[in-house]
C-alpha cells in the first residue's frame, strides 16, 4: 500500500499517525500529542557497562511503521560508544506495536545491550542473540 492512496482489494488500510493507544489521529492531533511533556518518552537508560557508554531510549513516534502485528508506533534505540566515549561502537533500532510491548522491549533491550557491551569490551566470547526477547505481558494485556 502506498501512503496517501486507497488500499487495493484485500489490503488492510492503515492510517499514517496514531496516538499511544493505537487509535488513528490526524497529523495536527499527532503534532499536539508530541508536544505534550512526557507523552513521547517511554523509557531511558544510560550508564557505563564494562567501560562502555550504553544508552537505551524508547519513545512513541506515532508514525506507522510496518510490523507483523500491525503498525509499529514505538521505537527503541540502543547504542554502545567506544572507550573514548565519542565513537559509536554499536547501535540498533527496534519497533513495537503497543505501549505494553514497548515497555517490555525497553527492559529486554537494556539487558541485551549490556551483553553486547561486554562482548565489545572483551568480557564475553560471543555476541548475544540478535533479537532480545521481551517478557510476555501480564494476562489480559495485548502484546
Image (cartoon, helix red, strand yellow):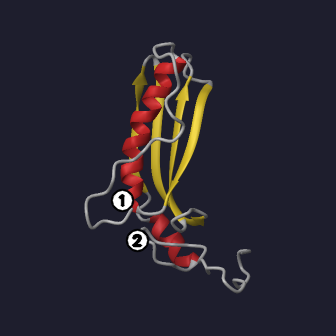
Which mark is first along the chain, 1 or 2? 2
Q: Rounded to the nearest whole Å, what is the CA distance between mark 2 and mark 1?
A: 10 Å
Q: Which residue is mark 1?
A: 100
Kindly state the secondary structure of the residue where label 1 is placed. helix
| Neighbour tally class for label 1: few under 14, some 14-19, many 20 plus, Cα within 10 Å | some
Q: Which residue is mark 2?
A: 21
Residue for point 25% across, 63% down? 139
Quadrant of the image containing the C terminus:
bottom left
Residue 80 percent location from the top left of the image: 53, 29
Residue for point 74% across, 74% down? 2
Kindly state the secondary structure of the residue where label 2 is placed. loop
Quadrant of the image containing the N terminus:
bottom right
Residue 128 vertical placement versus 126 (above, below): below
Residue 77 percent location from the top left of the image: 52, 44
Picture quadrant of residue 82: top right
Q: Is residue 37 visible?
A: no
Residue 108 percent location from the top left of the image: 39, 42
The nearer-to-camera label among 2 and 1 is 1
Q: Is residue 28 visible?
A: yes
Residue 25 vertical placement versus 53 (above, below): below
Residue 47 vertical placement versus 103 (above, below): above
Residue 26 percent location from the top left of the image: 55, 80
Residue for point 51% across, 78% down? 24
Amino acid at each position: 500500500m502506498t501512503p496517501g492512496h486507497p488500499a487495493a482489494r484485500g489490503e488492510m488500510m492503515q492510517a499514517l499517525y496514531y496516538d499511544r493507544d493505537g487509535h488513528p489521529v490526524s497529523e495536527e492531533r499527532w503534532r499536539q500529542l508530541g508536544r505534550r511533556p512526557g507523552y513521547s518518552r517511554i523509557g531511558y537508560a544510560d550508564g557505563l557497562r564494562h567501560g562502555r557508554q550504553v544508552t537505551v531510549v524508547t519513545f512513541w513516534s506515532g508514525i506507522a511503521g510496518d510490523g507483523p502485528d500491525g503498525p509499529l508506533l514505538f521505537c527503541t534505540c540502543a547504542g554502545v560508544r567506544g572507550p573514548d566515549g565519542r565513537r559509536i561502537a554499536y547501535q540498533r533500532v527496534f519497533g513495537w506495536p503497543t505501549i505494553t510491548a514497548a515497555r517490555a522491549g525497553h527492559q529486554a533491550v537494556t539487558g541485551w545491550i549490556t551483553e553486547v557491551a561486554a562482548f565489545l569490551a572483551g568480557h564475553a566470547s560471543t555476541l548475544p542473540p540478535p533479537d532480545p526477547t521481551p517478557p510476555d505481558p501480564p494476562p489480559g494485556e495485548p502484546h
